[in-house]
Image: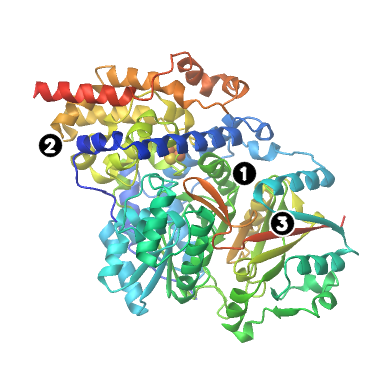
Amino acid sequence: MPMKIGTEPFFERVDRSIHDDFMRQAMASAQDRLRGRKLEATVGDDSLIDWELWRNAGEEIRRHTLENLDFYLEQLSESYAARGGHVFFAATAEEANRYIQEVVQKKQAKHVVKAKSMVTEEIGLNEALEAVGCDVLESDLAEYILQIDDHDRPSHIVVPSLHKNKEQIRDTFREKRGYTKSEKPEELAAFAREELREAFLKAEVGITGCNFAVADSGTVALVTNEGNANMVTTLPDTQITVMGMERIVPSWEELDVLVTLLCRSAVGQKLTTYVTGLSPDLEADSVDSPKDYHLVIVDGGRSKALGTEFQSALHCIRCAACVNVCPVYRHIGGHAYGSIYQGPIGAVLSPILGGYEEYGELPYASSLCAACTEACPVKIPLHELLIKHRQRYVSGGGHPKASEKLSMKVFGIGASSPSLFQMAKGMAPAMLSPFTKEKRIEKGPGPMKPWTEIRDFPAPSRDNFRKWFDEHKKKAGDDQ
Amino acid sequence: MQGTIQNREGFLNTIAERLGRQRKQSVNKPEWNDQPQFDVYKGATQDQLLDRFKQACEPVHTEVRETSVSELPNQLKETIMDYGSGSIVIGKDQRFVDFGLMPTLKPFDVHEWDIQLGQENIDKAAQANIGISFSDISLAESGTTVFLSDKHKARSINLLPYCSIVIVAKSTLVPRITQAMRIIDQRVKAGETIEPYINMISGPSNSADIEMNLVVGVHGPVKVVYLLVRDC
Ligand code: SF4
């Protein structure tokens, strides 16, 4: 599945999403829970002393690394190759896919298992592998659920199957895999465990993404909970890691800080169940380690952000904290973004990687309330980047398609008219859930201040956004 | 054997160009302004770390059994029985001898990892009920055990069996991931080749992908139990 998901125009996607009650409720409750856990594990954890210092540290490390990216990537390639691994630099998705196809064909491999693989979604690797006759199996539980449901689309960076309820999952398992048990999550997961265990043991090639590569030691770090990435990097004989070129740290010293920021911001855990450092293995007689290691480093449009006002977008560590506080995501859900990168970071990143033609309207899917910027553990000024996109877009950086003009009338007003902004501001109090204790809100006057300010707004009714959207859609239509 | 590197120069030249400068041949990493990681549990005694470690295990669904060096063989035997004994897999690890555990294991159906046997090791591990391993470094903050896995202390041992029993010596406790990564970092800087698989594990595998409900035991072990040994 490439970066683009769905073919409907933006406006229609939004329209459909806000009328999908299950989806909206699922998004809202997931946001509440993930955000609550994050607050508990960050500003709410006294043992960390001061979360702001961690954010500063994260920002400084990311800035330095990106400013010296050529050096650190060169160092990574040397250290990885010194351990016997092969490194391929791919300027485009096509180059990356071609190289991986060649590796797989040389091995005459038929069975591929994957884990943790957002960037492989972005480059459309599954289709490329299927084109050369491979079975490709996703092994993250959520990805597996989506894959067997006729390649359904992800709706959240961290929990991609968020839009599905357990009954739907049960029915899909029954229909596609002959599952006979109930919709209990334990039973569904146990079934997936059994099915995937066999696949792990028979796969010839394992493919993973990469949370962070460590430049000086030639290590790929994976941060996971299910254990599937460990299976994928243990059992198949050939190991391929695909990484976005910015996912790198100088050394294990910095890995420490970024892993801490990621685990706590993404899922509110001190550490995820598995934090694994995988480096090519020099020892020929190891039994349970791959025999052949490949690292594919993908540009795929990222370099277009370097040296521009959007460079800091590449600091992102994909924790989804910004997604989990976004009032617009809450109402329109992940699918409406039409990209695998969703929420505030998706609205910043998708136009960089995929261009304004395709994604120029996404920066308007924001109220500019700045909750995303406040939530970001590496301090990316997301709402400012959204404004910069809008400025570029309207000043000729993009050419809205005719079909998108209607949506521009609704969302295009965002920069000049405060309607959507007001709406979202009104919605924000509902987003502060009960477990967000007063003491935490007040802690650290800097980052929490905007929250305390919007807290005073009256709580809106649940249907406000939909009503507002319908009215504005009608008005925009009348103006045509 | 040295691996290959393809397409590098053009790729990195593009990056340097975009950054508006020549390629960098060297970079001085700055002293980071903020380093809050070193202040977490700073100055804590080994006993305080032990308490913290025990507390951290509960939320990660991991049972902790505390014991002394002399009681460890008995405790291990009891734990194996409590978790249904059956087939067991262990690494080739001198610590089983040092802690006097080999006689304890003898009556059980134990497979000791042996690289000469190749694939048979993996088959045994995949069918085993219990894997037993030693934590190399243990993180008090998160209840984490760190495994510096190599070809003898194989990665499959705490991954494939249904239960994972981990022996955690009190002397291996450090405050958090910071100290573990610092140890690894210093070895890299000293030019050592680090282990190909460094795994930091906090409890049994789990997932919250189905309606955000936590399910414990997905692909890795379903049960994890720590034998915490007061060796200092
Ligand atoms: S932009 Fe920041 S908050 Fe959003 S996913 Fe990236 S790192 Fe997390």
Taking the view exactly as shown, the residue that stands out farthest to the right is B70
User: Is the distance from the Cβ of mark 3 to the nearest ligand 1 atom less than 8 Å?
Assistant: no
Of residue A81 and residue A277, the one placed in the foreground of this image is A277
Label 2, label 1: how many angstroms apart (C-alpha)? 46 Å
Foreground: disc 2 or disc 1: 2
Label 2, label 3: how many angstroms apart (C-alpha)? 58 Å
Q: What's the mark number on residue A270?
A: 1
User: Is the distance from the Cβ of mark 1 to the nearest ligand 1 atom less than 8 Å?
Assistant: no
Foreground: disc 1 or disc 3: 1
Residue A245 in sight from this viewpoint? no
Q: Chain of mark 1?
A: A
- Determine the secondary structure under disc 1: loop
Which quadrant is the C terminus of chain A positioned in? Answer: top left
Q: Is residue A344 above or below residue B62?
A: above
Foreground: disc 2 or disc 3: 2
Circle 3 residue = B137
Of residue A138 and residue A433, the one placed in the foreground of this image is A433
